[in-house]
Structures are given as structure tokens and as C-alpha cells.
Amino acid sequence: TANGQVVYSIAEETQSGASVGNIAKDLGIDAATLSARKFRMITGSSKQYFNINASTGALFVNEPIDREQLCELKSACLLNYELVLENPLELYRMEFKVLDINDNSPSFPLSEYHINVPEFLSPGARFTLPNAQDLDEGTNSDPDVGTNSVQGYQLSPNHHFVLDLKGFQSGSKLLELVLQQPLDREQSALQQLVLTAVDGGDPPKSGTAQISVRVVDTNDNPPAFDRSTYTVSLLENALPGTLVVKLNASDPDEGSNGDVIYSFGSYTPQKVRQLFSVDPHSGEVRVNGTLDYEEASSYEIYVQATDQGPVSMAGHCKVLVNIVDANDNVPEVVLTSLYSPVPEDAKAGTVVALMSVTDQDSGLNKQVSLRIPPGLPFTLNSFKNSYTLITQGKLDHEKAAAYNITVTATDSGSPPLSSQKVIHVEISDINDNPPRFEEPVYSVYIPENNPLGALMCTIKATDPDVAENAYVSYSLLDGEIEGLPVTSYVSIKSDSGNMYAVRSFDYETLREFQVVVQAQDAGTPPLSSTVTVHIYVVDENDHAPQILYPTSTNTSAALEMIPRSAYAGYLVTKIIAIDGDSGQNAWLFFHLVQTSDPGLFRIELHTGEIRTTRKLGEDSTPTFNLTVEVRDNGEPPMSSSVAITVAVVDRVSKIIPDTRRHFKSPSNYSEITLYLIIALSAISFVFLFTIIGLTVIKCYRYSLYGDSCCAGFCGVRERCPADLYKQANNNIDARLPQGLKVQPHFIEVRGNGSLTKTYCYKACLTAGSGSDTFMFYNTCGPTGTTGPSAVVTERHLTGQSGQSAQNLIILKNDSITPNEPKHPNPDWRYSASLRAGMQRYVWLLCIWRRQESYVGDQEGRISSGQQSPVLLQAGEVSPPVGAGVNSNSWTFKFGPGNSKQGGPGELPDKFIIPGSPAIISIRQEPPNSHIDKSDFITFGKKEETKKKKKKKKGNKTQEKKEKGNSTTENSDQ
């Protein structure tokens, strides 16, 4: 390989399929990529003598080559090929040298030659013999080349002639028969010789010619030319008949022996004989055919001059004709590869076509340049004898779907010759353009009461792309019109863009609306655009005027009254009418179409007022019948009429109007009025049910928490202090000091334990209390164990004096066991301030309504530093002796309660009043037990205990009364 060129040698006549070489290995190319890179072999020959195996890269003979036919007059037979590979684009040159084989035998132009030899001719006389031709040679006389051409001649054995091969061996190709001994016509008038030509092949091949020698009388001077060789230059475009050269030969003999005739020599090739001619008398050599420099650059013409003697003699010369190249061949553009169609988004520099150019001329005539018209998005790049057509600008299929690019090839001859090659390059479309609507906004007018499926309009969008990229489909974007989807109003046909009405429109309900139409192409990815369509419903005259006043029925007319003293222009009545249409369709005109007295009444055209035209006479009829027609301005107009009876009375006040004329049939009520009635009724019922529901919920809550002493709700009456004194329940008796007035407030007590539900109890407090609700919680677990110590609740109790009582609180304490009293802290003692406070204020008034209620905490303490009501379920408590409190004014009475008591683990046996000498026992005893219920353990003050017991006995009667009152109150609630 040299300079990208591979040279192969192959013998002619090699059979098809014979291997020549491996082009992939020779060029260093992967054989597997040959097919993928779309290899092609390009040659200027009409036949494809070689081919390549795409899978292996092997180069093989496609068709046998005949060297003598392919390169008839050339010494070297060469075939040039080009190998083109794409991706990337590469070009390799291949040269095939066709080797000659000995496949042709030597042959003479004629099978028999005649020679006249004068008798007694001196030995040494020479006679020219014809040369044999071998098609395997490449010269003008011998087509074969090398050893396959004619290498020697042989003459059949004889006594008079020998062959002179000196001239043949020196390259002059002159073969002569030399007379060795004089001839004697009387001995032998005719001699037959055989001339054999032998080539140098292996094995050699030969050809023969018969030579007849006739002995005649002598003509001893042959004609002679002026020169032995003539050299002439001739343009290849010389026309037939052009003079090449004029030869001249002379013969010193006289008579017919000196007359000379010119002709081609026997070894002039047949091709030359066809291209040139020799005038036998003048010796002029002229062009007889069409010369072509590209076919042969020179010709050798052998001419002989023969005299007319009895024994003719000849002289020979050679004419060498050199053909001068003329610019007679136009350049030829060969399209090697074409990439079409080209995507319109191809980048600049994309190779579109690969071309090569050839010119059969030589020199400057062979130098060719290519060009394309300006203004195209393409350009040409050249390398060696090949050109590439590449893109240099942006392609747009919508502007140009294809290009016919004219490539002009011009040589450098004088004058220059040119040729053109048209390359058709198509531009493939990509989806780069969205559909475009013909209108930016569409306005559609459709009359109301249209039929279903009526064509409203046609939306049209175009896409400048092609094929699927230009196929446009239409759809409606999702949206709502008055709460309904768009598709319930209009529809659009996807392929044509026809928009149809899905329903019949009513101008009075919907006057205009908008929809958004989307046009989308079928490209990948698809592109779309939208347009807004404004749809206007056009009003039609589809409503007749409706007469609101006066009204008449089919059986009776509307009644109007006028006094007999009515003057001219008296207003009888006014027709009131409406029209459901709009615009000019709603313009109303009033006409008096019928009257019993045509001249008495008139009606205003636009207002509908009916007036008298003159004063009524004494003899006027008592009634007049009128028919009024109300007509709208539609096309065609619609009308309604009403019949009116006008009664003439003396005094209008005496007339009792007919109520039937004011009655309006239910069928005449408008739908709007009906809808309003239904809506108002529904709202009223909902409101009523809401109030009832709230009332029931409130009552239910109060039923859970018991009665209140405050202003009641749902029948719970207020509890006053006086009632509380009388209606204390069996569980707790709380009394206020004498002369203390308490405003109605209440506290709330909750409990659990064995009772899983929390109960609320309310009691009256003073008006100045800081809060009216007291919450008591029990955190005991299901097993009766006490939770962590915590304050249950605290509230201030304030009387009318505005002074705050001492705080009272109940605490839970885990450390106190049911049977073990807890000693007071040393810093808590029964001080004088505490005694004074207990004398001045009411500590607690609490009424329990439920017999199953009980104290939530198992154990507790009363602290002077906080305020809280004390809740106990059984037992009784009195203040200690010396506390300064009247024992009749402050007493907690713990009755036996309900027989259904809590478990022993839920109620404490004792509790301690810190700072006091008393341990209060709240151990529950069964009913009718004789055990003393007030187990007070005092510290050296037993008189106080005795007083408490006496007080308890004195109040038994009052306790029973209060218990009865409490039971009655529970029943009321």
C-alpha cells in the first residue's frame, strides 16, 4: 500500500471466484465493519471484474478478463478501482495489473503470399516477408507482450532461400527472404515455401503462412522513398479526410518498371488501416476515421511503393503519427454516495453526498473544478479527485422539502468544457411546529332552542409539518360551565374540528360561555396549541308576553269598574305584562283588538293604559267588553290577550269586587316563585330541627348532672337557699349561719371508684363567689388503691358582706390506711383565727341528689390554707369544742344513706382535721345499727362531744322532714 493505494497483479482469463487478496487485511480494516460501513467498489469500466466478500474481506474475481480485448493497443493493462467506506467517510484506491498469458497463437495476415523473383538474379537479393501477429502482444503489430509474443521464424528447408532474422532481433520487425543461389526458371518456375512463426510461451505456439516463389524475368530496381521514416503530429479532433502526410517514392527503371503504386505494408495493423488511408497514385496519407488521444497517443503506418514491372519490386517506409490531445472530453461527475433524506435538524457539516470527477483529456484539459449555485445551505469540500457535499446552514423542511442541487464540473482546457450533475436531496420533516389556528379567537353565535347535535362552527388549525407531524386532532380542555363539565354543552370532532351542540341552549338561562379547544399533532413528541372559543347564545322570540294584571280565565273576564261620571281620559286600568325574551323580542305593544263600543276606550301603545275617550252618558250601557292584545316585537311576533269587562257604576265604593278575578291558577305561577317557596320551607324546617336538636342535647346533659340551683333550662328549676334548707338529702345536711343570705350559685362534685361513671352535684353558693363550679375527682384505681396526693378543687365562698371565707380543701394521701388515723402536723394547730373564721362564714352547702354517690377519695385532710368543700358519704361531723362556732349553724349530717354502699376499700374509716384535736370517723355502718355514728376521739375535751350528741337528737325530726322534701324535689325533676 502506498499513498492509500493497493496494487494487485492477476493473470488474464482467471476464472470467476478466484481469490485475488484480502482487502481488509491489506488496508488494516476490520472485516466485520465492512458491511456496517456500507462499502462500495467504484470503477470507470462498464464491467465489474472484481468484488469483495462482505463478511471476510476477501477480494475475488467476479468476471474473467481478456487482456487483448480490454487493452488491445496498450503495453501495460491496468484497472483502477476505488473503495468507499462510510461512518466515517474513507476512500481507498486499488490498481489491478492484468498479466498476459499465452492464450493466442501467432498468425499471419494472409495465409498465402506470392513472390516474383527474376531469374538470374544475383544471390543476396532480399524479399520482404509479412510478420506474424500474436494477440498476446501489446504493440501495433504484436498484441502479446514479453515472452508470449512472436520470438522467432522458421523457413521450410530449400536450396535457394534463407531467412534473415537480424532485423527482427534488433526490434525493427523486418523479416526478409534472402536469395542464396540464382534461380533458373527453366529448372523450376515455381517454388513452395512454408514460413512458421513461433512465440515464447510454455508450451510455445506457432502459426504458418504459404510462400509461393515464381521465377520471372528481371526488374532489377525497386522504388525508393525520400525518407525511411516520416514523423507527423496530428490533433485528435482532426476530421476525416485531413491530410496526414504525402509520400514520394521513385523508381529508376523505365516504362512499367518505373511506375509506382502506394499501399499499406503487409504488417500495418488493421486498426490503423481503418483510421488512415493511402492514395495509391499520389501517396497521400489521410485521416479516414475518428482519432482519440485517450485511446492511442500515436500510430505507426507502414507504406510500400511497388513498381509495375513484370517482376514488381517494392520499397518501404514508416509513418509515425503522434496524436496531440485536444480538449474534447467534458468532465464527468460520478455520484459515489448520497445521504437522502437529510433530517431538517441536521447539524452543519453533515455529509450529504460523495462525488468523484473524471476527464479523459490530459494535462490542463484534465484539471477539473466543481461548483454549486450560491444561496443554498450546502457547500463542497474537495480532497484529491473526490468531493463531498456538506450542509453549512440550517435546514427547514417547511421552507424547502427538497433541493435539486446542480453540480457543475469545468475543466481547464481552452476553451473550457463543463458538465452538470443534478443531485436530488430530500429534507425529512421533524415535528418542530405546533398546530396554528386560523383565528386567534373564535366567536360563535348560535340561536337558542337549537336542535341537539347542531353544527356550531368549524375550528381549523394547520401544521406546516408533513405526514404524521401535520395530522391535527382536536379536543376540548377540561373545564366547567355553571358546575357542569364542558362536554355536557359542546363536543368537537377530533379529525375535522367541527363543534356541535350537545344540548339545546336557552338564552334566558345561559347567554354566553367559553370553551378552550386544543389542537395536537401526531408527532413524537406531540405538539399542541389552544384557542379560546366564545359562544354567544342568540335570543329568539320563544316567549309570548305574559299578562300579569289584569287576569282572566277561560270562563270569566277580568272585571274593572268606572263611575258613570268618568270624564274623558279617565284611567280605567293599566295592563301589566312581561316577556321572557330580551332585546327587541321583549318590546311590548298594547292593542285594543275588540270592544263593544269602539269609540269609547283607547289604549296607550307602549304603557298599556286604558282610558276613556269621552264622558259617559246617562244612557250608557252598564258594561263594556274589551279584548286587549299584548304583542312583542319579535320575528314572527308573539302575543297574548286578556278579556276585560268594564262595569259602569254610580259609586265605585259600592262595588264588591269579584275575588275570582284575583285568583291565579297554580299552573300560572312561575317556576321561580315555586322554587322560592320550596327553599324557604326547607330552610325553616332545618332551622326548627336544629333548635329542637340543641334543646334535646342540652336537656340530656342536665339530666346527667342533676338539678341546679341556678336559673334552669329544660325544666330544671332554680334552687334557692331557702329550698336547700328544707330539701337537704339523706346523705349530707349543710346549714348556714342564722341571718346569712346566699345568692344562687352552685358547685360541682364528681366521683368514681366502684361507680365507674363520674357524677356532678350542684349546690348554692354566695353571689360573690369567685367561681360557681367545684370539681371533685377521684383517681383511685379499680382495686381501690389510692392514687398520688393531689388537690381536688378549691373555691372561695363569699357572703353578702364581701368577705372571703377561709380556704377549705380536701387532699388525698396514700400513706393513710383505712384503719389507722393520721396525726396532725405539729405546725397545724387549732388557732383562734380559724375558730373566728368558722363562726363567721358558711364552709360548705352541698346537696347530693343521687343515693349512690360517695366521696371519691378514700382519705383526706382539711387545710386552713386552701378552700374546698368537704364531701363525705356516711357519718357525722361537728366542729370541735371551743372552736367558737354555734353547733346549730354548722353541721354535716351523714345519714345512713342508701343500703347500696361502696366497697370497704373505697371509703376511708377516718380523716383528720389538721390543727384540731378531732379524728373524724366516716366508717359506714349498716342501717338500723345501734353503734354510735359519731366516733369522735378528742384530746381532753369530751364536753364538746356530748353537746354534739344532744344536738343530733334534737334535730332528728327536722332531718326527716328535709329528707321528705328532698325526695319530692327529685320526683319533680
Image: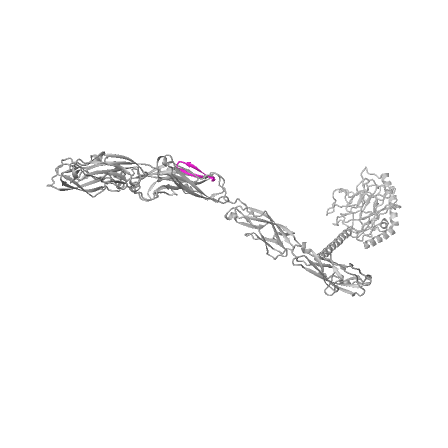
Q: Nearer the viewer, residue 442 or 879?
A: 442
Quadrant position of the C terminus in the picture: bottom right
Residue 244: name its quadrant: top left
Residue 106: name its quadrant: top left
User: Is residue 945 visible to the viewer in this orientation of the structure?
Assistant: yes
User: Is residue 581 visible to the viewer in this orientation of the structure?
Assistant: no
Q: Position of residue 55 (x, y in %)?
A: 39, 43
Q: Position of residue 709 (x, y in %)?
A: 82, 49
Count of marks overlaid on the render: 0
852 horizontally vs 214: left or right: right
* The magenta stretch spans residue 700: no
223 horizontally vs 415: left or right: left
Q: Position of residue 698 (x, y in %)?
A: 77, 51
Quadrant position of the N terminus in the picture: top left
In the current view of this chain or complex, which residue is farthest to the left?
186
22 horizontally vs 971: left or right: left
Q: Which residues are magenta?
A: 375-389
Q: Main secondary structure of the magenta part?
A: strand
Q: Nearer the viewer, residue 497 or 297?
A: 297
Task: Name the residue located 86 percent from the left edge and 53 percent from the top edge.
Answer: 961
Q: Nearer the viewer, residue 548 or 743?
A: 548
Q: Position of residue 452 (x, y in %)?
A: 60, 57
233 horizontally vs 584: left or right: left
> Is 364 placed above or below 591 here?
above
* The magenta stretch spans residue 382: yes
Q: How is the image coloured?
A: one colour
